[in-house]
Image (tube, grey):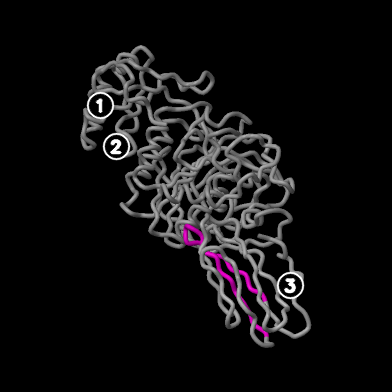
């Protein structure tokens, strides 16, 4: 949600009490008043008029700057004809809470329902996809990353992107770790916006978004993970995110950990990002008690007791919980989807992640949307093991789930005279003489994701029936 372009001169947007940073403000310039190369010079001119001190300058995700001055001077600055509005700087926080049992996230996101199978099946490793991790840095030498951490930026200290709090490394491990990760081949770019104590502010987060936007190459498939939440909604963060997403970057953002309406907080209130809530390891996908909720939460993902890489040493691991961890799962799934469908746009990938999700999976939730994150694949059901009398006609409807309808059907190994309808998935025809066939049916969903099922058909002269199979009766 971008700032209102009709804001009158002199608009000063306050921060929530308790989160406000005294004498620190973000100035958003009117786009028609300054070209990108001239933002820095205009920032200094405007600041000097009010005896302020310019901090960071933003040129890509928005045109504006950070400035230190008192409230009265900020109001005078807001009234300048070149200024759209001024927003007070505020504290922002990482979104995790430490807990301790085993990790179930990878096992959960590749299943349509419980019970789980103690496996993680994925369609690709998403090599060639870049994920910007806007967080506390990454321990690049950790063995789980296998040398895939690329140079990034430290907008706090202007130094190393090493992780001194552990949050960013943990999140990056879930996104793309070799052992812990969803998308095991992605490149990871640390964008360090947090201090070692796990705190940041609006100005630093804006600097991170601005850097990502400036370094995103045209046409590059890139995802930005923001396991971050403010204590309120921020117009200037929304503006920067809208422009960064318009540049072709998919954003996955944390819903927040206050058990409140996610629409009241940035960046969880973004309508074009993937806003992620957290589920607990309860055996039924219940919403985690702390997770924010409501219309702005696009999808839920595992958030409790998630084991991932730790920044303590190169083989360290630890467990954390929160919508931070859930968001990292969503970034990984977005990378998988984009790897499978490289010609799709960022907006299409965002929609694909939501369409592929399992709808109605969160019990006792009572709100919409109600979606659970799912790894892209199509599940074929209803293919029987067939025991039939030669010369008799057969008809069997095969179904699909967990993909994006409509589906296109194909099959290999069918007996002569038996076909599959490519639109409906109906298998029909006259069974030939006695023999055995291995039949594989494949469904391709609207995004191009495929799924297959295989069964052995035995044609004998004893009876005409479908043998029982685990998928018998599914449609």
Quarter of the image with the C terminus is bottom right
Please say whether residue 31 is visible from this viewpoint.
Answer: yes
Q: Residue furthest front?
A: 392
SS at badge 1: helix
Residue placed most toward the observer, 443 or 200:
443
SS at badge 2: loop
What x and y, as percent, mark residue 415? 60, 81
From mark 3 to mark 2, how far is it between C-alphas? Answer: 66 Å
| 244 inside magenta stretch | no
Q: Is residue 36 left or right of residue 457?
A: left
Please say whether residue 124 is visible from this viewpoint.
Answer: no
Q: Earlier in the sequence, mark 3 or mark 1?
A: 1
What x and y, as percent, mark residue 262? 55, 32
Q: Earlier in the sequence, mark 3 or mark 2?
A: 2
Q: Earlier in the sequence, mark 1 or mark 2?
A: 1
Which of the labelled discs sits on residue 59, or is there none?
A: 2
From mark 3 to mark 1, how far is it between C-alphas? Answer: 79 Å
Q: Determine which residue is flagged by label 3.
A: 466
């Amino acid at each position: 949600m971008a700032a209102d372009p009709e804001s009158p001169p002199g608009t000063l947007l306050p921060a929530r009490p308790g989160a406000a940073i005294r004498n620190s403000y973000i100035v958003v310039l009117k786009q028609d008043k300054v070209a990108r190369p001239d933002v820095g010079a205009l920032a200094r001119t405007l600041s000097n008029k009010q005896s302020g001190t310019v901090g960071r300058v933003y040129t890509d995700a928005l045109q504006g700057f950070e400035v230190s001055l008192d409230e009265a001077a900020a109001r005078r600055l807001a009234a300048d004809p070149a200024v759209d509005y001024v927003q007070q700087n505020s504290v922002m926080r990482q979104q995790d809470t430490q807990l301790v049992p085993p990790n179930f996230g990878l096992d959960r996101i590749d299943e349509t329902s419980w019970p789980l199978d103690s496996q993680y099946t994925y369609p690709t490793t998403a090599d060639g996809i870049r994920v910007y991790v806007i967080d506390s840095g990454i321990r690049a030498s950790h063995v789980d990353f296998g040398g895939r951490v690329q140079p990034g930026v430290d907008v706090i200290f202007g130094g190393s992107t090493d992780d001194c709090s552990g949050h960013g490394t943990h999140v990056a491990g879930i996104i793309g770790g070799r052992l812990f990760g969803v998308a095991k081949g992605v490149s990871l770019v640390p964008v360090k916006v947090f201090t070692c104590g796990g705190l940041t502010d609006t100005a630093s987060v804006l600097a991170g978004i601005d850097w990502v936007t400036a370094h995103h190459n045209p046409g590059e498939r890139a995802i930005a993970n923001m396991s971050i939440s403010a204590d309120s909604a921020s117009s200037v963060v929304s503006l920067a995110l809208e422009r960064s997403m318009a540049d072709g970057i998919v954003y996955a953002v944390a819903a927040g950990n206050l058990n409140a309406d996610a629409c009241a907080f940035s960046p969880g209130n973004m309508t074009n990002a993937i806003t992620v809530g957290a589920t607990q390891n309860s055996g039924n996908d219940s919403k985690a008690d702390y997770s924010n909720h409501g219309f702005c939460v696009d999808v839920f993902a595992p958030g409790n007791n998630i084991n991932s890489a730790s920044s303590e040493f190169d083989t360290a691991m630890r467990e954390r919980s929160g919508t931070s961890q859930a968001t990292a799962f969503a970034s990984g799934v977005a990378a998988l989807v984009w790897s499978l469908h490289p010609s799709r746009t960022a907006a299409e990938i965002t929609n694909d992640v939501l369409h592929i999700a399992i709808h109605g999976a969160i019990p006792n939730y009572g709100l919409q949307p109600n979606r659970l994150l799912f790894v892209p694949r199509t599940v074929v059901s209803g293919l029987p093991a067939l025991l039939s009398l030669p010369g008799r006609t057969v008809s069997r409807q095969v179904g699909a789930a967990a993909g994006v309808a409509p589906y296109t059907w194909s099959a290999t190994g069918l007996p002569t005279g038996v076909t599959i309808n490519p639109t409906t998935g109906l298998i029909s025809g006259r069974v030939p003489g006695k023999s055995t066939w291995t039949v594989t049916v494949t469904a391709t969903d609207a995004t191009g994701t495929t799924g297959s099922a295989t069964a052995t058909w035995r044609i004998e002269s004893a009876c005409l029936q479908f043998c029982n199979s685990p998928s018998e009766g599914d449609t």
